Amino acid sequence: MPAMPASGTDCPATGAAVIYHPIGIIHSPFSDWRGMPIQPAGARGVKGRVEIAAPYRQALKDLESFSHIILLYHFHLSKDYHLEVIPFLDTVPRGLFATRAPRRPNPLGLSIVKLTGIEGGVLHIEDVDIVTGTPLLDIKPYVPAFDIVTEATGGWTQGKEKEVEVMRSDGRFHAASEPR
């Protein structure tokens, strides 16, 4: 199947353009995708930082009381996507929405990271699985009482949980001509 181009920006409900502006930038030891962890579970102890743009720093008030935060970011290295992919941890083509592949119609990433400190407009974080220079779109506190779903199932990933700790990015989602 050929790669799909990025979609338009109009909201089907309102017809208005959907535009997001980064609120900061994520820094990590990973200068590109080669060999980086594929999920925070495989990045235990990897340190990074998030620089928050000056206009948004007041919004950090009270965030330091949370041990973990959810980072929502733009996969800025993703250029197109396929509706079926062979995901990390598998050899079988899966529907894109049943995976966490970075090449998506709306290339949004989500990582739950440990917040180790805040200095001015800089968040110090751990368990980072994000390429340095990634634009940050939003931050939300991780609240165990709200975010843990005890009856959740992992679909095709069941039984592969330990593999994520050692799996590293191998380029399957970074070559625009690749049919996966």
Image (spheres, rainbow, N blue to C red):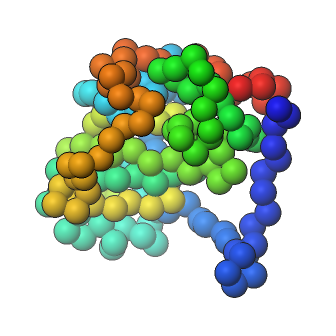
The residue shown at (24%, 43%) is 114
- The residue sitting at the bottom extreme is 14
Residue 102 located left or right of residue 161: right
Q: Nearer the viewer, residue 170 or 114?
A: 170
Residue 58 located left or right of residue 80: left
Q: Position of residue 31 (x, y in %)?
A: 54, 27
Q: Quadrant of the C terminus?
A: top right
The residue shown at (39%, 44%) is 111
Q: Compared to 105, does 39 lie above or below?
A: above
Label total for image: 0
Residue 133 located left or right of residue 84: left
The residue shown at (72%, 76%) is 12
- The answer to whether one can see residue 173 in this image is no
- The residue sitting at the right extreme is 2
Q: Position of residue 177 (x, y in %)?
A: 82, 26
- The answer to whether one can see residue 44 in this image is yes
The residue shown at (19%, 68%) is 62
Residue 163 located left or right of residue 114: right
Q: Compared to 121, does 29 lie above or below?
A: above
Q: Position of residue 132 (x, y in %)?
A: 51, 36
Q: Nearer the viewer, residue 69 or 120?
A: 69
